[in-house]
Amino acid sequence: MSSICQSCGACCASFRVDFHPAELAGGAFAWGQGVPSAMTVPVTPAVVRMCGTDDAAPRCVALAGEIGQAVRCTIYDERPSPCREFDVEHAACLRARQRHGMSI
Ligand code: SF4
Ligand code: SF4
């Protein structure tokens, strides 16, 4: 996680986070201990979603802290692949930051 991300967290409170259940704890493609099932909701047999990311005001259940101040992912070592693929180089990073009142 880059230092800018540690004082941001906007993407964790902007977008749905969907992934294959194989990344859940005990799954064949789990990172580390795997994403705790209790932090997810099933969408289809092949898709689970991080709780809170589909709310009207989205915020991943695993995000701790205050957006735009200081945040951390409480399951960083286990976080699912969409989170691993997203960073400040992603076009949606700026969109997320603007949504939360931040600029660059
Ligand atoms: S929106 Fe961009 S800067 Fe903010 S936490 Fe996500 S990747 Fe980092
Ligand atoms: S799992 Fe962690 S990195 Fe992924 S959206 Fe939730 S808080 Fe952010």
Image (spheres, rainbow, N blue to C red):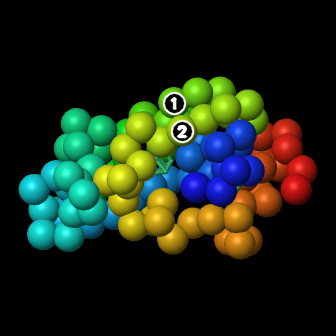
Residue 62 visible in this rendered orientation of the protein: yes
First in residue order: circle 2 vs circle 1: 1
- Residue closest to the far front: 3
**Residue drawn where x is 89% and y is 50% of the image:** 103
Q: Using the rendered view, name the quadrant where residue 59 is placed.
A: top right
For the residues bearing labels 2 and 1, Cβ distance under 8 angstroms: yes
Which residue is tagged 1? 64
Q: What residue type is labelled 2?
A: Arg
Q: In which quarter of the image is the N terminus?
A: bottom right
Q: What element carries label 1?
A: strand
Q: Determine the CA span between mark 2 and mark 1.
A: 5 Å
**Residue drawn where x is 75% and y is 35% of the image:** 68
Q: Quadrant of the C terminus?
A: bottom right
| Ligand 2 within 8 Å, label 1 CB | yes
Q: In this view, does 54 lie to the left or right of 87?
A: left
| Ligand 2 within 8 Å, label 2 CB | no
Which residue is tagged 2? 72
Q: Which amino acid does label 1 sit on?
A: Ala
Residue 58 visible in this rendered orientation of the protein: no
Q: Residues within 10 Å of mark 2 (few under 14, many from 20)?
A: some
Residue 30, x across and y down, in percent:
21, 63
Q: How crowded is mark 1: few (under 14 residues within 10 Å), some or many (20 or more)?
A: some
- Residue closest to the far right: 103
Front residue of 9/7: it is 7
**Residue drawn where x is 13% and y is 62% of the image:** 27
Which numbered circle lies on residue 17?
none
- Residue 76 vertical placement versus 30 (above, below): above
Q: Is residue 22 left or right of residue 87?
A: left
